[in-house]
Amino acid sequence: MSEYPEIPYLVEEIVGDRGLTVLLNNAGIFVKYTTNQKPDRGALIKNFDTNAAGVAVLTQVCQAIL
């Protein structure tokens, strides 16, 4: 789900005309990052992009068929 423009097409391919009753949006990642290391903006952004933005985008795409 790293390519946001593809999400609507993936959802349509998987769900088809059956519709969606429940959305369990529980996937996530953890890129190791501690606050006592040198700042690593890339690691923080990767965590946020998958765990927050990805959830929001998938939920928004699926909202119309729920």
Image (cartoon, rainbow, N blue to C red):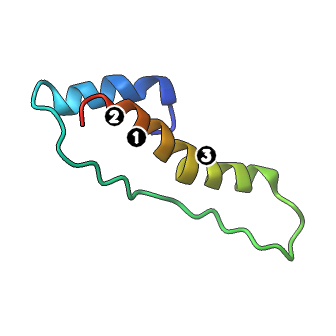
Q: Mark 2 Cα within 10 Å, few/some/many (few <14, many 20+)?
A: few
Q: Secondary structure at mark 1?
A: helix
**Residue tagged by mark 1?**
59
The residue lying at 15 percent from left, 26 percent from top is 16
Along the viewing direction, whichever of 31 and 54 lies nearer the viewer: 54
Residue furthest bottom in the image: 36
Horizontal arrangement in the rendering, residue 8 relative to residue 5 (left or right): left
**Residue tagged by mark 3?**
49
| Label 1 with label 2: CB-CB less than 8 Å | yes
Q: Position of residue 47 (x, y in %)?
A: 62, 55
Q: Amino acid at mark 1?
A: Thr
Q: Secondary structure at mark 2?
A: helix
Q: Position of residue 5 (x, y in %)?
A: 48, 23
Along the viewing direction, whichever of 19 and 48 lies nearer the viewer: 19
The residue lying at 30 percent from left, 54 percent from top is 24
The residue lying at 50 percent from left, 31 percent from top is 3
Q: Mark 1 Cα within 10 Å, few/some/many (few <14, many 20+)?
A: some
- Name the disc covering residue 63, or none: 2
Q: Position of residue 28 (x, y in %)?
A: 48, 58
Horizontal arrangement in the rendering, residue 49 relative to residue 5 (left or right): right
Q: Mark 3 Cα within 10 Å, few/some/many (few <14, many 20+)?
A: some
Q: Position of residue 29 (x, y in %)?
A: 52, 60
Q: Is residue 49 above or below residue 27?
A: above
Distance, label 2 to label 3, CA atoms, is 20 Å
Along the viewing direction, whichever of 14 and 53 lies nearer the viewer: 53
Q: Amino acid at mark 2?
A: Gln
